[in-house]
Each structure stands twice: as C-alpha cells, then as structure tokens.
Amino acid sequence: MVKAVRVHAYGGPEALAYDDITVGAPGPGQARIRQAAVGLNYIDTYHRSGLYKLPSLPHALGVEGAGTVEAVGDGVTNVKPGDRICYGSLLGAYAETRIVPADRLLALPDGISEETAAGIMLKGMTARYLVRVTYPVKKGDTVLIHAAAGGVGLIACQWAKHLGATVIGTVGSDEKAALARAHGCDHAIVYTRENFVERVKDITGGRKLPVVYDAVGKDTWEGSLDCLAPRGMLVSFGNASGPVPPFSVLTLSQKGSLFLTRPTLAHYIATRAEYEETADDLFNVITSGAVKIEINQRYALKDVAQAHRDLEARKTTGSTVLIP
Ligand code: NDP
C-alpha cells in the first residue's frame, strides 16, 4: 500500500482524501516511479472543485512531479530503474508511487533537483509556450503578465525579460510587487488598488500592448482587452478568479481587431518531439541562470488541503511543492 491524495466527490479542500492505494507492476509501455516531490498548481483546485472534470472518481490530483524510476514494463527503452526523472501535465501526481506512460517521462538533468523540477514542470513549460510559441515575445515588446508573483507568473516574467521585453506585471500586494520586480518585472501594478488599464496606458504613452497573458480570468477579462493595441492578442489561459463569462465576438472588432486564444499546455506538448523541445528549453533557461526558480512553500503531501487553502487565498508566491 502507498499513500495518495484523491477526490471521491468534487468540493472544497475537505474533498482531498489521504488514501491508501495499491500500485502494482507496470504494464507494457509503463514505468513505476517513486516521487521525491510533487508540484502544486492552480489547476489542481479546478480538478478538486469540478470546474475541470476528472476522467473518473475517485481520482488522484496533481499534474507534475519528479523522482526515480522503480520498475519498467515490456517494451520500455527510454528509462530504466534508478533513473532520475520528471514530468508535467500527467494527472494523478499526488502519490508516493505511481504508474505512468514511460514515454511521458523526461530525464532530469544534473544540476536540477527533484524538488525544483517538481515545482516547475507544468508552470515552466506553460511559461515557455506562452512567451515562445503562442505570442513569441520579441526584443522591444512591452507585455502584460497578470498574477506576476505566482507560479507561472514569476517564470514568465523572467523569460519575457530574457527575450528582451519590457515586462508589466499585476500583483495583489506590495510584497508581491517587490518579488515580481526582483524577477524581471519592470513595472509591478498592485491591481487590487490601482487601475491596471490606466497604468498600462501611462507606461506605454497611450500606445498600449501587443499581448496580454491573462490567467486571472473573470476579474481581469474586460481590462485585459482594453490594454491591447489594435490587432493585439489576448492569451486567456486560466481562471484563478473564476471563468471568463460568455461574450460577443463582435467585442474583438470593436476593441481593435483583436486576437483571442484560450490555450492549454497539453496541445503544445502533444508529441514527444514538442514535449522534449519545450522541456529542454526550460531546462536551458534554468541552468544558464536566465530564469531563477525559488520554491517558496513546502507542505507534506498529507497537508495538501492547507496548501489548497493558501493557494486559493492568494497567500503563496512562486512555486510550491508537496513532499510525499
Ligand atoms: P498562481 O501561483 O499564479 O496562483 C494564482 C494567483 O492568481 C494568486 O496567487 C493571485 O495572485 C491571482 N489571483 C487573482 N485573483 C484571484 C482570486 N480571486 N483568487 C485566487 N487567486 C487570484 O497559480 P499557478 O501558477 O499554478 O497558475 C496560474 C494560472 O495559470 C492559473 O489560472 C492556472 O489555471 C493557469 N495555468 C494555465 C495553464 C494552461 O496551459 N492553460 C497551465 C498552467 C497554469 P495575486 O494575489 O497577485 O493576484
């Protein structure tokens, strides 16, 4: 028996059950891994609440982790027992031990710890596709990243800065503003007190922006559209304040022939080649020092309900890991 945190019925943090489960031998194409650390992500709260449906119930939460291969099934050639590995975007991570498709495991480079990898595989690969693929940031661009002191936010700010952008970030407090500024954010706007649309107009001399990366959702939606220059792109990639309500497509024309995309990581790392390219790029910016990773919160896996409460109460910054 091993421990796993599962949801039996959708709900609040109390819906997280610390269960005993059986993990057998890996089947063909699979690997059994022992996890040193597991990442906490905002998407875990959507899976817990039912905003995003789980494939079945009960089901373990969590989408990123790192550890060691224990055993492999028939036909597995890319990993072997003892290998240090990590992964992102693979549901069921809240567990001491789990079985995964071996072709979704990545070799963990020397110089990156299990804890760091567990805290950034989903967030960092997301930051990468946002700034390198969805709207590729160019030298001289001014970009807006909401929730700049969060998990994805701190990585995306540093990466956009590294690509040569002037980075504007929104944050919920002065402490978070200082943290964002220390991680590539040129202008930190405390949007709980300041009007971020007016600030963006001031900062850009009225020109506004080619892109806004918005994972706050409901509360920032209107303002994000108003921050865009004609033919700018709104990248709406999350719902931390709640999902964006239905809207008229005509709005995009009225506000300047805008582009809107609602991307999700899975579609950017669907093939093994895309997955490796994305992860390699992430590992490179970390090992080169262009992007610094700090794990700002650690919880025992059994205390995950408190981690969810803190995440939803906006008390966390940067990355958070759960230790099985
Ligand atoms: P964060 O660490 O960024 O935590 C969420 C942050 O959102 C909070 O810290 C808070 O920062 C801000 N926020 C604003 N309004 C609210 C609110 N009403 N309630 C709670 N938080 C609020 O989380 P992650 O880094 O894990 O994820 C960031 C976002 O990116 C999430 O929306 C997530 O779903 C999305 N995401 C999307 C992916 C995709 O491919 N589409 C993949 C990965 C993540 P502050 O106090 O500064 O406002």
Image (cartoon, grey):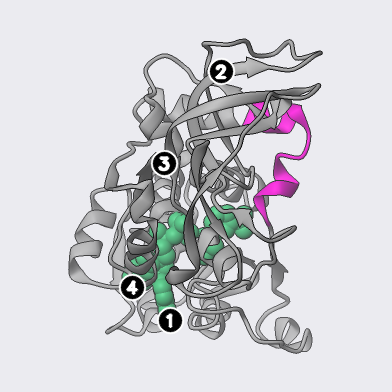
> Is residue 259 shown left or right of residue 47?
right
Q: Residues within 10 Å of mark 1 (few under 14, many from 20)?
A: many
Residue 130 appears in the picture as rendered: yes
Residue to which mark 1 is pinned: 197
Residue to which mark 2 is pinned: 70
What residue type is disc 4 on? Ala
Q: Residue at x 78, y 84 (%)?
A: 249
Magenta stretch: residue 153 in it? no
> Is residue 278 shown left or right of residue 204?
right
Residue 165 appears in the picture as rendered: no
Q: Residues within 10 Å of mark 2 (few under 14, many from 20)?
A: some
Number of on-image labels: 4
Real-space CA distance between mark 3 and mark 4, rounded to the nearest whole angstrom: 19 Å
Magenta segment, which residues?
264-278
Real-space CA distance between mark 2 and mark 4, rounded to the nearest whole angstrom: 37 Å
Give the image quarter of residue 279.
top right
Vertical placement of residue 19 versus 240, above or below: above
Q: Earlier in the sequence, mark 4 or mark 1?
A: 1
- Name the quadrant of the C terminus: top left
Q: Residue at x 62, y 44 (%)?
A: 89
Q: Nearer the viewer, mark 2 or mark 4?
A: 2
Q: Residue at x 71, y 87 (%)?
A: 246
Q: Earlier in the sequence, mark 3 or mark 1?
A: 3
Q: Nearer the viewer, residue 116 or 184?
A: 116
Where is residue 18 shown, x and y percent of the image? 45, 54
Residue 119 shows which numbered tag? 3
Vertical placement of residue 259 versus 112, above or below: below
Real-space CA distance between mark 3 and mark 2, rounded to the nearest whole angstrom: 21 Å
Where is residue 237 shown, x and y percent of the image? 60, 63
What residue type is disc 1 on? Val
Real-space CA distance between mark 4 and mark 1, rounded to the nearest whole angstrom: 24 Å
